[in-house]
Image (cartoon, helix red, strand yellow):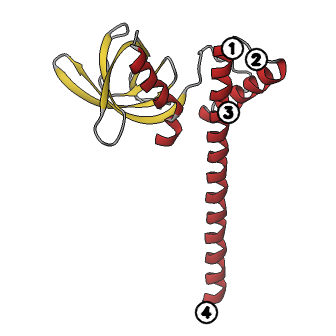
């Protein structure tokens, strides 16, 4: 004979456990967002003032290391990031033309200097593209010159970021730079 009371209690406990895990995950994501905002504030201060006090510099370095590990879980604790800014996962719709063909894709991570586009078809390293970047849900977009700096092609093995290309932003005007900075600062909101 089946004991529905015990089964119902077990299901209720499992639902409560799932809800608790979801709540913990949401709190952890919020802590990462808060840490990223603090990192950005300190990073701006560091760039405008040229340096930070020793204790604030230590806080900046600690945040950078923790966020690197949060954004790239496979990194080892002794990883040394050579980028001038953190790479942040995001999802930003983009388009570009390649050999008279319009391509649609997504930026799946971004830094202040560039990012990675998930795309089945990629141009050669060194190619300069005009990247159409959608900046909101209303269809507003900007054109940004980028240069392809790496290409990852699917070779039948698991690829962390999938097939796509790394790019760096080329010289951009101040207004475009401001929009790109905003996209970077709000990247976690579009994940």
Determine the residue positioned at 37% across, 7% down: 126
Q: Which mark is residue 52?
A: 2
Q: Earlier in the sequence, mark 4 or mark 2?
A: 4
Q: Which mark is residue 49?
A: 1
Image x and y of residue 156, in percent: 40, 29
Q: Secondary structure at mark 1?
A: helix
36 over 145 or under it: above or below: below
Mark 1 to mark 3 CA distance (whole Å): 16 Å
Which numbered disc, 1 or 3, marks the residue that appears first in the sequence? 3
State which mark lies toward you, 3 or 4. Answer: 3
Say if mark 1 contacts mark 3, CB within 8 Å. Answer: no
Crowding at dot 3, Cα within 10 Å, few <14 / some 14-19 / many 20+, comes out as some
Tell me the SS state at disc 2. Answer: loop
The reply, left or right, for residue 96 in relation to residue 158 is left
Sooner in the amino-acid sequence: mark 3 or mark 2: 3
Q: Within 10 angstroms of label 4, few (less than 14), some, or many (20 or more) residues? A: few
Which residue has dot 4 on it?
1
Q: Secondary structure at mark 4?
A: loop
**Residue for badge 3:** 38
Say whether marks 3 and 2 touch (CB < 8 Å). no
Residue positioned most to the right: 55
Label 1 close to label 2 by CB (< 8 Å): yes
Residue positioned 67% across, 44% down in the render: 31
Instruction: Give percent across and percent down for residue 168.
Output: 44, 14
Mark 4 vs mark 1, CA separation in Å = 74 Å
The crowd level at tag 2 (other Cα within 10 Å; few <14, some 14-19, many 20+) is: some
Marks 1, 3: nearer the viewer: 1
Furthest toward the left, the residue is: 100
């Amino acid at each position: 004979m089946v004991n529905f009371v015990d089964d119902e209690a077990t299901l209720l406990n499992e639902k409560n456990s799932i809800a608790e895990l979801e709540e913990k995950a949401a709190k952890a994501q919020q802590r990462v967002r808060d840490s990223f905002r603090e990192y950005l504030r300190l990073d701006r201060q560091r760039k405008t003032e040229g340096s930070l006090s020793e204790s604030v510099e230590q806080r900046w370095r600690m945040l950078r290391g923790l966020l690197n590990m949060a954004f790239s879980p496979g990194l080892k604790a002794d990883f040394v990031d050579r980028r001038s800014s953190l790479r942040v996962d995001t999802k930003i719709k983009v388009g570009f033309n390649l050999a008279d063909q319009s391509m649609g894709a997504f930026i799946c991570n971004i830094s202040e200097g560039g990012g990675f586009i998930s795309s089945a078809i990629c141009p050669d390293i060194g190619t300069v593209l005009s990247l159409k970047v959608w900046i909101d849900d209303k269809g507003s977009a900007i054109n940004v010159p980028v240069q392809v700096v790496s290409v990852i092609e699917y070779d039948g093995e698991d690829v962390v970021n999938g097939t796509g290309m790394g790019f760096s932003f080329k010289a951009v005007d101040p207004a475009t730079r401001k929009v790109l900075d905003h996209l970077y600062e709000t990247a976690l909101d579009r994940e």
